Amino acid sequence: IGPNGAGKTTLFNLLTGQLAPSAGEVRLRGEQINALAPHARAQLGMGRTFQIAKPLIALTALENVMIGAFMRHPALSLARDKAMAVLEKVGLAGVARRRAGDLTLSERRRLEVARALATEPEIMLLDEVMAGLNQSEVGQAIELLQGLHAEGLTFLIIEHNLKVVRAFSERVVVLDRGQLIAEGTADQILSSPAVIKAYLGEGHQ
């Protein structure tokens, strides 16, 4: 978490290979991966969603997810089966044949998750996947992610919704202007004077 401009998405870009670090190392399962391109990191098990959902709007939800599935399942029938299974898991099986451009915001957010899941990641980076959702939709999204986590999937999440942070996070890291200013449990972080000043505001109780 952190205020706008803190460097959260930049950090994700560094981790997934969209940007090259000027110093330091990115490691996955103990191996340094600085030189690997984004697709190579995906093949190693790193999935990602983006802050602004940009599906291929002329394609169906199923076709969008099949693109991700092709990485592990190059045969068309296998990719289709995998994509349908993922859509079922995220609650979008009923709109599988609908154009992505006709989906609601909540459905597009789930489609982003589905596209990443189709690559069969071990770790997923979610960039404000709850943004724009109402309270009910946020609750459904938390339930979905908790179910995926229970199956063994690890998440890194950028999130402004403190309800999500409290409900879902085992460890919270706070950035401000590119600097790490705090880390700990959600309760520790949300009571930290430095975090309150930088992120929550002086009047936060």
Image (tube, rainbow, N blue to C red):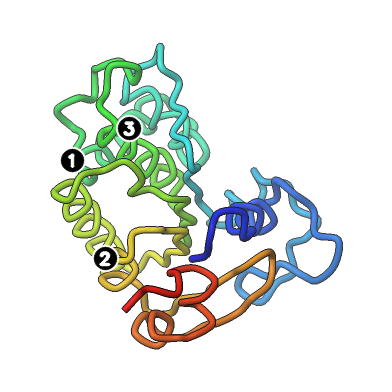
- How busy is the neighbourhood of tag 3: few (under 14 within 10 Å), some, or many (20 plus)? many
In terms of image quadrants, where is residue 149?
bottom left
Residue drawn at x 40%, y 88% is: 188
Residue drawn at x 33%, y 28% is: 80
- Horizontally, residue 78 falls left or right of residue 135, namely right
> What is the C-alpha distance between the residues marked 3 and 2?
21 Å
Residue drawn at x 63%, y 68% is: 28
Q: Label 2, secondary structure: give it.
A: helix
Q: Which residue is mark 2?
A: 163
- How busy is the neighbourhood of tag 2: few (under 14 within 10 Å), some, or many (20 plus)? few
Q: Position of residue 191 (x, y in %)?
A: 39, 85
Q: Position of residue 195 (x, y in %)?
A: 50, 77
Q: Which residue is mark 3?
A: 108
- Identity, as a three-letter code, of the amino acid under mark 1: Gly
Q: Label 1, secondary structure: give it.
A: loop
Numbered circle sitting on residue 184: none
- Identity, as a three-letter code, of the amino acid under mark 2: Lys
**Between tags 3 and 1, which lies in front?**
3
Front one among 34 and 74: 34
> What is the C-alpha distance between the residues marked 3 and 1?
12 Å
> What is the C-alpha distance between the residues marked 2 and 1?
22 Å
Contact flag, marks 2 and 1 (Cβ < 8 Å): no
Q: Which residue is mark 1?
A: 91
**Between tags 3 and 2, which lies in front?**
2
